[in-house]
Image: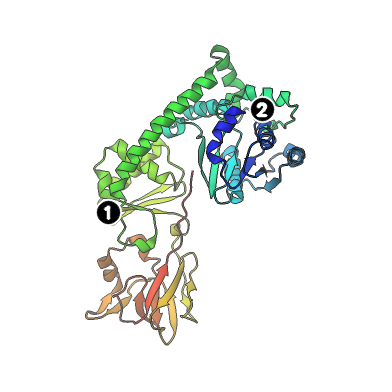
Amino acid sequence: MDTLLHSLALWRSAPRWHIALSGGLDSTVLLHQLATLARTESFPPLRAIHVHHGLQAAADAWPHHCQRLCDALGVPLTVVRVQVAPGASLEAAARDARYAAFEQVLGEGEVLLTGQHRDDQAETLLFRLLRGTGVRGLAGMSGQRPLGRGMLVRPMLQISREQLEGYARANALEWVEDPSNSDTRFSRNYLRSDVLPVIARRWPRFAQTFARTASHLAEAHALLVEVAEQDLQPAQVASPFPWLNLPSLALAPLLTLSDARQRNALQHWLSSLTRLPDSQHWAGWQDLRDAAPSATPVWVLADGRLLRAGERLWWLADDWLHTPAGEWEWADPAQPLSLAANGQVRLCGLVPQGRVQIRYRQGGEVLEVPGRGHRDLKRLLNETGLPPFVRARLPLLFIDGRLHAVANLPGRGGSDALLHWMPPPNAQRLR
């Protein structure tokens, strides 16, 4: 228990601790230890959360088992039922659904505690090594990381499964066994049941050694993060269009770096935005980087796209991946107008008289510019340097069928009304 208390020292001022309770050995021991310690220690309020995936018949009994356990320990339980999206990897889909549920439950500053232990860390290291992962992956499971509005903390990474089993037997604890854990068609189960026992016969302390290796690699990764942050600093100059509120980087500072440092910097920057590509897919970065200046290359990643435009790199996700369409009759221009999948517009200044519409570019639009007469909109947009991917979704203000203003580009029309556009959010994901 001293190891557990030491691991939790930084989080004792959190507003609440949530315990991820599957009903298995690891989470059962974690819950029992914390509920026992809470009788003598000053802990945040405890609450358990059980995620029911509904993937097998045996799992239907687990919420009831978890409820009996929590009732006996005086810990409130939340049961969340999730739908697992079909896909190539059932394990990955179930994990994504589970952590999405955890994110929904976590409040601001709250902590989710999970039961992964030292043997899990060794298994993770070997699994990732076989997949050819880099230093970031070989650092293993981190002891803590942000999750939603709170933090995910793994306080038992220094405790072996053997120790957990000893504690469970000494306290007469009951836990459930997931039948799918014996299905060696799943790679992790194969490693756990067929490979790691063979390693243990020759190297009995391999889990402790693997955990130490993961710790060394975590330190190496921390150094790479420091280098990445230093390399990114000159590239993080403000965009000429801050109202876009999109993640972006200046390209020129990155081009001064070696290929390895470019990849390291981009990996760090992209890690909060998308699942990272494997080594084979980094050719997409080279194609984007080396394209002709007049080109607008795109690197498609798991959760969005990286574009090059205006000597900047732009990250697009969510609504930004789709070109909006439609036009709107603005019956009350004194009120903001929401655009489907494209944020919101509002008028500043005098409210125009006549038929007010919001449209998108169709081609051939002409705008009257004070002192310059009628000018082609395409040429005017070229003069602004506005990235091409923005132009198709840029709201245009029409009054009585005539183009009067372009959103967020003052001085490009003769109307007293300025059209202010608040683009759609570009959600960032922590992976």
Q: Residues within 10 Å of mark 1 (few under 14, many from 20)?
A: few
**Secondary structure state at the residue bearing disc 2:** helix
Give the distance between the C-alpha atoms of the residues marked 2 and 1, in whole angstroms: 53 Å
Residue 152, above or below 422: above
Q: Position of residue 391 (x, y in %)?
A: 36, 65
Residue 213 left/right relative to 257: right
**Secondary structure state at the residue bearing disc 1:** loop
Residue drawn at the location 37% of the way across and 40% of the way down: 282
- Identify the disc placed on residue 352: none
Residue type, mark 2 in image: Ser
In the picture of the structure, the residue carrying the numbered disc 2 is 182
Front residue of 82/382: it is 82
Q: Position of residue 304 (x, y in %)?
A: 44, 51
User: Which residue appears farthest toward the left when viewing the image?
Assistant: 371
User: Which residue appears farthest toward the top when viewing the image?
Assistant: 202
Residue 3 left/right relative to 334: right
Front residue of 223/274: it is 223
Q: How many marks?
A: 2
Q: Position of residue 122 (x, y in %)?
A: 53, 25
Q: Position of residue 209 (x, y in %)?
A: 50, 20
Q: Residues within 10 Å of mark 2 (few under 14, many from 20)?
A: few
- Identify the disc placed on residue 311: 1
Residue drawn at the location 47% of the way across and 71% of the way down: 326
Is residue 406 visible to the viewer in this orientation of the structure?
yes
User: Which residue appears farthest toward the bottom when viewing the image?
Assistant: 353
Residue 207, above or below 420: above
Front residue of 329/101: it is 101
Residue type, mark 1 in image: Glu
Residue drawn at the location 35% of the way across and 77% of the way down: 405
* CB atoms of marks 2 and 1 within 8 Å: no
Residue 69 left/right relative to 386: right
